[in-house]
Image (cartoon, rainbow, N blue to C red):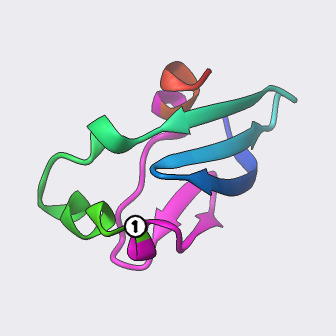
Amino acid sequence: MLEIKKAHYLEGYKIELLFNNGIQKTVDLQNSLDGQVFQSLKELSFFRNFKINFNTIEWENGADFAPEYLYEIGQ
């Protein structure tokens, strides 16, 4: 089961993630912010304020992404 151990905001909609398997990836979520729950994340000041909750990153409005999805789109 994939888990995010560390997360660091880079720029724009990019976040650097360290997964529990030791792999580090950068995700660009700009094209993943579809749907009502992600609307506030389009404001960069809100987007930058995430935390690790359980096994993934989460924003204060409850928006999150599955760690498997983040791993898949990461580079």
As displayed, is residue 37 above or below residue 13?
A: below
Does residue 1 appear anywhere in the picture? no
In the rendered image, the residue lying farthest to the front is 11
Q: Relative to 67, is 66 on the left or the right? A: left
As displayed, is residue 15 above or below residue 50?
A: above
Q: Name the residue located 80 percent from the left edge and 26 percent from the top edge.
A: 23
Give percent across and percent down for residue 69. 46, 30
Q: Is 64 part of what is drawn in magenta?
A: yes
Q: Quadrant of residue 45?
A: bottom left
Q: Name the residue located 58 percent from the left edge and 27 percent from the top edge.
A: 71
Question: Disc 1 residue type?
Answer: Leu
Give percent across and percent down for residue 73. 48, 23
In this view, the residue in front, 19 or 14, is 14
Q: Quadrant of residue 16?
A: top right
Q: Relative to 71, is 65 on the left or the right? A: left
Say what secondary structure mark 1 lies in.
Answer: helix
Q: Name the residue located 19 percent from the left edge and 63 percent from the top edge.
A: 39
| Mark 1: few/some/many CA within 10 Å (<14, 14-19, 20+) | few
Q: Name the residue located 53 percent from the left edge and 74 percent from the top edge.
A: 49
**Chain part drawn in magenta:** 45-69
As displayed, is residue 64 above or below residue 16?
A: below
In this view, the residue in front, 3 or 73, is 73
According to the image, label 1 marks what residue? 44
In this view, the residue in front, 24 or 52, is 24
Does residue 29 appear anywhere in the picture? yes
In the rendered image, the residue lying farthest to the left is 36
